[in-house]
Image: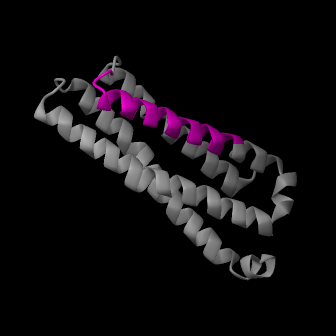
Amino acid sequence: MMDFLAGHYLWLQAFHIIAVIAWMAGLFYLPRLFVYHAQATIGSETSETFKVMEHKLLRIIMNPAMIASWLFAIAMLAVRPDLWAAGWFHGKLLLVVLLTVMHMVMARWRRQFAADANTRSHVFYRYANEVPTVLMIGIVILAIVEPF
């Protein structure tokens, strides 16, 4: 199995990047939907439309993309266990874990919107929308520059 993975490492890497792009697209878009949903009147047609959009984005795109990102990363680590010795990798892994936590927090916010139980303003979600961007910047810099 390891020989197969090693022989297809570039494919693993390509699929990992594709999955990360899809995941990040959702992480950028979902809090944007929350900004507008927080301004919609509860029970309105607009609010109900946002509920459907948020649910589908999370379940059909974001969750599978997050899982695929992690699975391809684990497969690449199986081939390249030497990465565990790199300091930059530990920093990147920490930021990816924080990104995963942010994903879970957004899933909780989606459930609150679905139950018409949101208590946060659109301004809160405007700030929350920046968290994935900041984490992504750190992840990319660590992965490409490998500063330590």
User: Can I make out residue 146 in this image?
Assistant: yes
User: Can I make out residue 147 in this image?
Assistant: no
Q: Is residue 107 magenta?
A: yes
Q: Which residues are magenta?
A: 94-117
- Residue 144, given in percent of the width and then of the height, sits at 67, 57
Q: In the orientation shown, which residue stands out farthest toward the top? A: 119
| Image quarter hosting the N terminus | bottom right
Which residue appears at 18% of the width and 27% of the height?
A: 40
Q: Is residue 86 magenta?
A: no
- Residue 82, given in percent of the width and then of the height, sits at 86, 61
Q: In the orientation shown, which residue stands out farthest toward the front? A: 115
Nearer to the camera, 124 or 120: 120
- Residue 87, given in percent of the width and then of the height, sits at 82, 47
Nearer to the camera, 147 or 92: 92
- Residue 47, given in percent of the width and then of the height, sits at 19, 32
Q: In the orientation shown, which residue stands out farthest toward the left? A: 45
Nearer to the camera, 59 or 122: 59
Quarter residue 30 falls in: top left
Nearer to the camera, 34 or 112: 112
Which residue appears at 83% of the width and 53% of the height?
A: 84
